[in-house]
Image (cartoon, rainbow, N blue to C red):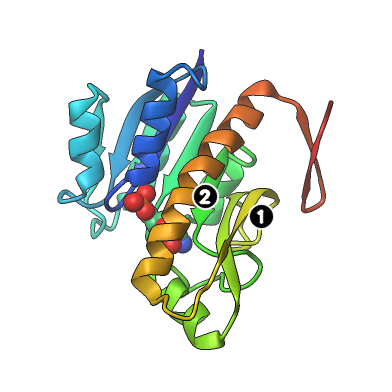
């Protein structure tokens, strides 16, 4: 079985999309733990409703990363999904799980990415920039923040009457689809990483 760990700081709608895809048989995997740095994260409620084990590590604990690393090493999952994880993963954890950790980013990277670009701030910057298109990116996590090999992107049009909230809503819908299909690709093993490209193998 393909074992997944999800790390989430907030609502966890992407986490829910993976739960639903597993339940409906769309992907053949198991989520073995939901880890959160925020005891009030709604993702924790979603996990509890689905019988998925939860772990809360206080995000302000100076040992946050060593504790997280120990947990991940003890599980040794096939895949770690960062869902709205609002911290920067340190290099030693990234390198320990290189190409086994993916992130969802709410823009078409490399635009509107990097330190300081997260959540609603990204959508606000997109609207202000005048860009007519935005979207989402699913990518492998590397030590270069938001710059790892891109697995999948989906495009959303920015309309005149969009604000950061309506744009966020539209992009969330695409994120859910992109995340599930990216995980399906990773489970299938039908890809090859070449530099920053994730090439499909047929
Ligand atoms: C998603 O839009 C994701 O792209 C973003 O947080 C949201 C989490 O939504 N991630 C980042 O900004 C990371 N830099 P969710 O909790 O409803 O799944």
**Residue at point 52%, 50% (across, down):** 103
Look at the numbered disc 2 and say if its residue's Cβ is closer than 8 Å to ligand 1: yes
Residue 156: x %, y % from top left = 56, 62
Q: x%, y% of residue 33?
A: 33, 29
Q: Is residue 86 above or below residue 42?
A: below
* Among numbered discs 2 and 1, the one appearing first in the sequence: 2
Q: CA distance from mark 2 to mark 1?
A: 9 Å
Q: Nearer the viewer, residue 161 or 52?
A: 161
**Relative to 67, is 18 on the left or the right?**
right
Q: Quadrant of residue 157?
A: bottom right
Tag 2 and tag 1, C-beta contact below 8 Å: yes
Which quadrant would the C terminus be assigned to in this image?
A: top right
Within 8 Å of ligand 1, the CB of disc 1?
no
| Residue at x-position 34% and y-position 36% | 16
The image position of residue 144, as x and y in percent, is 63, 62
Dot 2, how many residues are within 10 Å of its Cα: few (below 14), some (14-19), or many (20+)? many
Q: SS class of the residue under badge 1?
A: loop
Residue located 65% across and 30% down the image: 185
Q: x%, y% of residue 145?
A: 58, 63
Mark drawn on residue 41 = none
Say the numbered circle drawn on residue 148: 1
Q: Is residue 104 above or below residue 3?
A: below
State the residue in front, 81 or 137.
137
The image quadrant of residue 54 is top left
Q: Which residue is mark 2?
A: 103
Image side of residue 61 versus residue 80, left or right: left
Q: Residue at x 39, y 25 (%)?
A: 31
Residue 36 in the figure: left or right of residue 88:
left
Location of residue 25 with respect to 186 vertically, above or below: above
- Which quarter of the figure has residue 201? top right
The residue tagged with tag 2: helix, strand or loop? strand
- Describe residue 184's horizontal placement relative to residue 14 as left or right: right
């Amino acid at each position: 079985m393909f074992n997944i760990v999800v790390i989430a700081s907030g609502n966890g709608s992407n986490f829910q999309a993976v739960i639903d895809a597993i339940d409906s048989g769309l992907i053949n995997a198991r989520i073995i733990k939901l880890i959160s740095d925020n005891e009030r994260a709604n993702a924790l409620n979603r996990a509890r409703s689905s019988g998925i084990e939860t772990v809360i590590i206080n995000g302000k604990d100076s040992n946050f990363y060593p504790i997280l690393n120990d947990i991940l090493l003890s599980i040794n999952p096939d895949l770690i999904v960062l869902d709205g994880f609002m911290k920067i993963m340190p290099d030693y954890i990234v390198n320990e799980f290189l190409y086994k950790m993916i992130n969802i980013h709410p823009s078409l990277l490399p635009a509107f990415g990097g330190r300081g670009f997260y959540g609603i701030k990204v959508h606000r910057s997109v609207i202000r920039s005048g860009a007519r298109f935005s979207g989402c990116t699913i990518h492998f996590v590397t030590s270069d923040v938001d710059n790892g090999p891109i697995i999948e992107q989906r495009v959303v049009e920015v309309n005149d009457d969009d604000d950061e909230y309506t744009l966020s809503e539209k992009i969330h819908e695409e994120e859910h689809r992109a995340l599930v299909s990216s995980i399906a690709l990773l489970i299938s093993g039908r890809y090859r990483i070449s530099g920053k490209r994730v090439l499909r193998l047929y």
